[in-house]
Image (cartoon, rainbow, N blue to C red):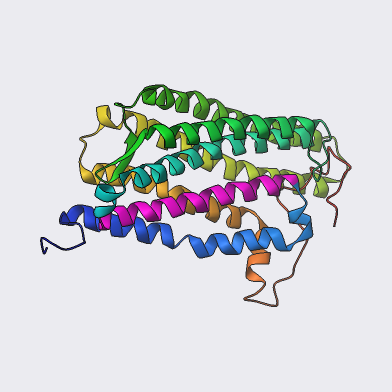
Amino acid sequence: MVENSVFNSDTELLIIGVIYAILSAIVFPVYVLIIHALHSRSDLRENISYKLINLLNYCDVSQASCHFLTGLFLIFPFFTKKVDFFVRIVGCTANTLWLATFVIMAILSLARIGIAFFKTKPTKWSIWMIVALVIGSIYIFLVWAIGCITQNFQLTGPSWSYDMTVKFAGLFADLELVLCFPTLALSFCSYILIIYSIYKVSKRQISQLKSSSSLRTEVGILIQATILTTYMAILITFWHNAESWFKMTNVTLAALNCVWILFSHLNSILLIATNKGVRNQILKPFCNRVPSRHTSRLGPLSHVSSVNIEK
């Protein structure tokens, strides 16, 4: 490598940077299609659950943008030398968006509980939803603002981490665990309760077709929620215990960071795979024969709520 080259002289970090950039970039067109699909249909656009899912999509695609920039920082190391304050802001932003996904998933799971057990309207914001969003947004904003001001997140080799030399950085690292695991447990338990409720009610219903359809719908949601929450829990566990469990090399750190990057891919794949309405809407421009059915895996539960999605 030429000494005066703008590219990273460390071949290993250069390759890792290219991998980061490619992995992050390929998810952009997928999310463009998903977000367009959720905005283009009124039944999806007006549904509160889908509004929260779209908010999660925006967080994911924004994280992917930060990961793409991370790849550029590794390919062109002059960024960390000349504008390290900007590099740290990007890292802090990526981490804050990651934390925001936990808040959104927790509110989404509670919204599903409200629809299932308390007949909450699926197209109307409840007071508790607004309060939860406001509190969560304030917390996330404070984490981001304090992180940007104190510059408590740094790019060390191929991986992001808290800069423990910065005051209160250790506190924010501990707060991540306090936030993440309870919200993951809440999300998973919520869908378990919904599945149990549908299964229990379906036994007493005369129309087995209707009940089994609702059960399949919620099972699909449970599969998506279970995979995502399990993936996130494993990632958080490995991320906070990596130093004691593994030998810290560039390859190890890059592998952990790639698992973080691939979360955006997993979320988009699961959303398309488990939701026929979104899948049909995405395929519609490419195949005119795909019927546009106003069906949704996150619609109101027909056996516990008489409120239908407004069309």
In this view, the residue in front, 20 or 195, is: 20
The quarter of the picture where the C terminus appears is: bottom right
Mark count: 0
Bounds of the magenta segment? 48-76
- Residue sitting at x 60%, y 28%: 186
Residue 300, magenta (yes or no):
no
| Place of residue 152 in the rendered image (x, y in percent of width and height, measured from the top left) | 37, 32
Q: Is residue 122 left or right of residue 101?
A: right
In this view, the residue in front, 271 or 78, is: 78
Residue 128, by quadrant, is top right
The kind of secondary structure the magenta stretch mainly shows is: helix
Residue 138, by quadrant, is top right
In this view, the residue in front, 18 or 292, is: 18
Residue 75, magenta (yes or no):
yes
- Residue sitting at x 74%, y 55%: 45
| Place of residue 156 in the rendered image (x, y in percent of width and height, measured from the top left) | 26, 40
- Residue sitting at x 81%, y 42%: 124
Q: Is residue 41 visible?
A: yes
- Residue sitting at x 22%, y 52%: 13
The quarter of the picture where the N terminus appears is: bottom left
**Residue 145 higher or lower than 158, as above or below:** above
Q: Is residue 308 left or right of residue 248?
A: right
Q: Is residue 266 visible?
A: no
